[in-house]
Image: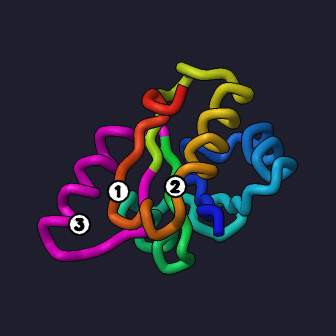
Amino acid sequence: MSIRLYCDEDSMRHALVAALRSRGLDVTTAFEDGMIDREDDEHLDHASQQGRVLFSFNRGDFYDLHTEYLSQGKTHAGIILANQQHYSVGELMRRILRLAASRSPEKMRDQVEFLSAWG
């Protein structure tokens, strides 16, 4: 079973979402889920409740939130972080698909993956 992805407000570019979906990845966005203008922890909780790995360009805040969750004994379905405007849509798609092919939902639980490592 492949990971399912939730794109927060920063990462929900239509071209990327369409490209991932066209290649079979189950993706939803903050917009589609009615999660616009929510706090980061609300996005992470929502994604996790849906069994989805959160994808964001908001590296610092979500990495801090990941650390906070673990220290409080809270769990999440996983986080994928990337540098904004560092990759083309095609490169983002390739890296996300490479990661999704290598990591099961179980292996993503409570983990943070940086797309820079999936080149």
Residue at image location 60% in from the left, 62% down from the top: 3
Secondary element at image label 3? helix
Mark 1 vs mark 3: in front: 1
Q: Position of residue 118 (x, y in %)?
A: 51, 32
State the mark number for residue 103. 2
Mark 1 and mark 3: span between their CA atoms?
11 Å
The residue tagged with tag 2: helix, strand or loop?
A: loop
> Residue shown at 53%/63% (left/top)?
104
- The answer to whether mark 2 and mark 1 are in CB contact below 8 A is yes
Q: Earlier in the sequence, mark 3 or mark 2?
A: 3
Number of the label disc, if any, that sits on residue 69: 3
Magenta-drawn stretch contains 69: yes
Q: Nearer the viewer, mark 3 or mark 2?
A: 2
- Of the residues under marks 2 and 1, which one precedes in the sequence? 2
What is the magenta range? 57-79
Residue 75 on the magenta segment? yes
At label 1, counting other C-alpha atoms closer than 10 Å, the crowd grade (few under 14, some 14-19, many 20 or more) is some
